[in-house]
Image (cartoon, rainbow, N blue to C red):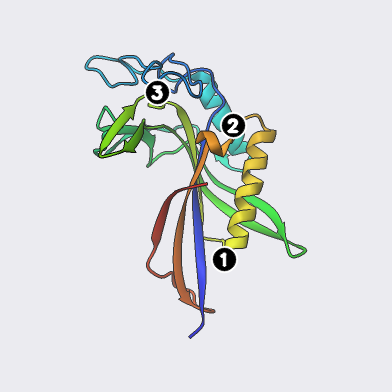
Amino acid sequence: MDFEVIIGMEVHAQLSTQSKLFCSCPTGFRAKPNSQTCPVCLGMPGALPVLNKKAVELAIKAALGLNCQIRRRSIFARKNYFYPDLPKGYQISQYEEPLATNGFLEFSINGRTKQIRVRRVHLEEDAGKSIHRKGETLIDFNRCGVPLIEIVSEPDLSSPREACLYLARLRQLLQFLGVSSAEMEKGELRCEANLSLRPKGGSELGVRTEIKNLN
């Protein structure tokens, strides 16, 4: 039996702000470990987050570039999970009411235009960084609270080649708009690929597998 692949993408892009999403700590790359932190991004008791206006403006700019509908109301939520580089024990993200929905991105392949639907664009904060070496793990919290947008596509990609072209076109758009430098070697652009297989010509999706943190 012949099978075909179905691919959806979740892309995280770091926004080009001078400070973090909910505090005034800087976002510079390769700073001394744990030198760009404060009680807010470390999740200390009693610390109160204040939303970065510039991050919201850049996220809206990206969503408009992706032909999305900007929602007049969006809500932040707690995404709870335990990991050593997540000091609060949860990530501030958006879920039920994201910043923007129902967009699309187009690129050319084999002389034709392919349109990929964008389900949602939402704001969230980054986690820290775990460095594993010689039986120990070091934690750098500098990235905690760095502003990200997550761009979630519908499962409209049907080959690795299409997935590559989609990501290249998306990166080009984010850089052109000044939303993100999207330098992958700095962790500013990462993606999760959601893959499934189905019999060729079928309509139902197969069992989905998510491959994390690719670039």
Q: Residues within 10 Å of mark 1 (few under 14, many from 20)?
A: some
Please, which residue is most extreme toward the bottom here?
1
Q: Earlier in the sequence, mark 3 or mark 1?
A: 3
Amino acid marked by disc 2: Ser
Q: Which element carries disc 3, helix, strand or loop?
A: loop
The percent position of residue 29, horizontal first and vertical second, equals: 51, 24
Residue beneath disc 2: 180
Q: Nearer the viewer, mark 3 or mark 2?
A: 3
Depth check, front residue: 6 or 129: 129
The percent position of residue 102, horizontal first and vertical second, equals: 54, 48
Depth check, front residue: 114 or 84: 84
Q: Which element carries disc 2, helix, strand or loop?
A: loop
Q: CA distance from mark 3 to mark 1?
A: 37 Å
Q: Residue at x 44, y 26 (%)?
A: 146
> Which label number is shown at residue 158?
1
The percent position of residue 117, horizontal first and vertical second, equals: 57, 54
Q: CA distance from mark 3 to mark 2?
A: 18 Å
Amino acid marked by disc 3: Asn
Q: Nearer the viewer, mark 3 or mark 1?
A: 3
Locate residue 98 relative to residue 185 in the image: left or right. left
The percent position of residue 17, horizontal first and vertical second, equals: 54, 22
Residue beneath disc 3: 142
Name the image quarter holding residue 35. top left
Q: Residues within 10 Å of mark 3 (few under 14, many from 20)?
A: many
Q: CA distance from mark 2 to mark 1?
A: 27 Å
Depth check, front residue: 188 or 35: 35
Locate residue 32 relative to residue 105 in the image: left or right. left
- The answer to the question of whether label 3 and label 2 lie on touching residues, with beta carbons closer than 8 A, is no
Q: Residues within 10 Å of mark 2 (few under 14, many from 20)?
A: many
Q: Residue at x 61, y 30 (%)?
A: 179
Q: Earlier in the sequence, mark 3 or mark 2?
A: 3
Q: Which element carries disc 1, helix, strand or loop?
A: loop
